[in-house]
Image: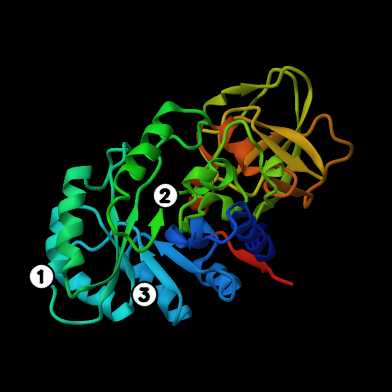
Amino acid sequence: MRPLVATIDLNAVCHNYAVAKRCAPGREAFAVVKANAYGHGVREVVTALHDIADGFAVASLEEAAQVRAMHGQARILLLEGCFETVEVQLAQQLRLDIAVQNNQQLAAVLGAPEGQSLNIWLKLDSGMHRLGFDSTELRAAHQALRDSRHCNELNLMSHFACADERGHELTERQLECFLDVLDLDFNQRSLANSAAILTIPAAHMDWLRPGIMLYGATPFADLSVAELGLEPVMTLTAQLIAVRRVAKGESVGYGASWIASRDSVIGTVSCGYADGYPRHAPPGTEAVVNGQRVPLIGRVSMDMLTVDLTDLTAPAIGDSVELWGKQLPVDEVAQGAGTIGYELLTKVTARVPRRYLND
């Protein structure tokens, strides 16, 4: 078997969910498990949180159906809502909470046949300008739904654009916009994503929506996972599949873009961009070999990458290589590659086997 595995610590997922709950005592929390639980495996993550989570949040009806099959009673929030009346009927059958974020979705709900009433989350565009009603439209939608037989709970939600940039002025404006419509009668309110859960108590409201923090990555550029009390969840581990000596002046990899500045020992690692490792990771991006950090050299290939082992003692074929995880936070790798931990975690491909730890 090709030596590459993503080890998923489900105990860490539960720990990180508990951190979110401790940040806002008395509030409930939708564990965000969209995109196959950010690449970690939705079946396994939902199972681990089955008796802990107050609810789950997903992006599509397909994801919602998958979670409902594993948890018959949990609240499941469909974050983008329904796009056709027939989808509203499916949401009724699945007993979902659904977002309603424009007049087309509102009409689909109001035009649906008789059926299970829904918990509806009106989405306010408080300043991100991606989805949602403006304040005037939201007031009209509130009136239409308050009188509708299709509505069980009528709730309010919005989403921060810059909560990960502490002190950003837009965050305060968005919070004020959200508070300005609370003269309306809502059953439940939700505003806080991971960044707001961790640093903006005024945004906690009734329901939290922890996403990236569940998976042991930080939403902040200036606060590490350790500083936030979170535990890394995914450790991506490969092996050295070749070790060779390269003379000073020789090149390594496609394009001959890296040239040895000294006589060097080079390791070839069983992971590449077809596995989800970022092709654009520059030389110097770190990995861990036998507990020591080493730099990436040359271009990342489809199935392999290369590292400089010159400063290690007796590296050998079969030695373990951590691409990110317990010893090397995914956020450090992401920063080196000019991206974010969210992208690296969600892009680990299906050909990488997952191994689950759960005491």
Give the distance between the C-alpha atoms of the residues marked 3 and 2, in whole angstroms.
24 Å
Q: Nearer the viewer, residue 216 or 7?
A: 216
Q: How far across and how far down the image is residue 339, in percent? A: 50, 35
Quarter of the picture holding the C terminus: bottom right
| Earlier-in-chain disc, 3 versus 2 | 3
> In the rendered view, does 51 fall on the left or right side of 211?
right
Q: Could you tell me the amino acid type at mark 3?
A: Ala
**Residue underneath mark 3:** 65
- For mark 1, give the secondary structure: loop
> In the rendered view, does 243 fall on the left or right side of 209?
right
Rendered residue at 83%/41% (across/down): 315
Q: Are marks 2 and 1 in contact (CB under 8 Å)?
A: no
Q: How far across and how far down the image is residue 133, in percent? A: 22, 47
Disc number for residue 191? 2
Packing grade of label 1 (10 A; few <14, some 14-19, many >=20) is: few
Q: Could you tell me the amino acid type at mark 1?
A: Gly
Give the distance between the C-alpha atoms of the residues marked 2 and 1, in whole angstroms.
28 Å
Q: Nearer the viewer, residue 345 or 113?
A: 113
Q: Are marks 3 and 2 in contact (CB under 8 Å)?
A: no
Disc number for residue 111? 1
Work out whether residue 174 can be spotted: yes
Q: Could you tell me the amino acid type at mark 2?
A: Leu
| Earlier-in-chain disc, 3 versus 1 | 3
Residue 70, placed above or below residue 278: below
Residue 39, placed above or below residue 286: below
Report which quarter residue 153 is drawn in.
Answer: bottom left
Residue at the outermost front position: 183
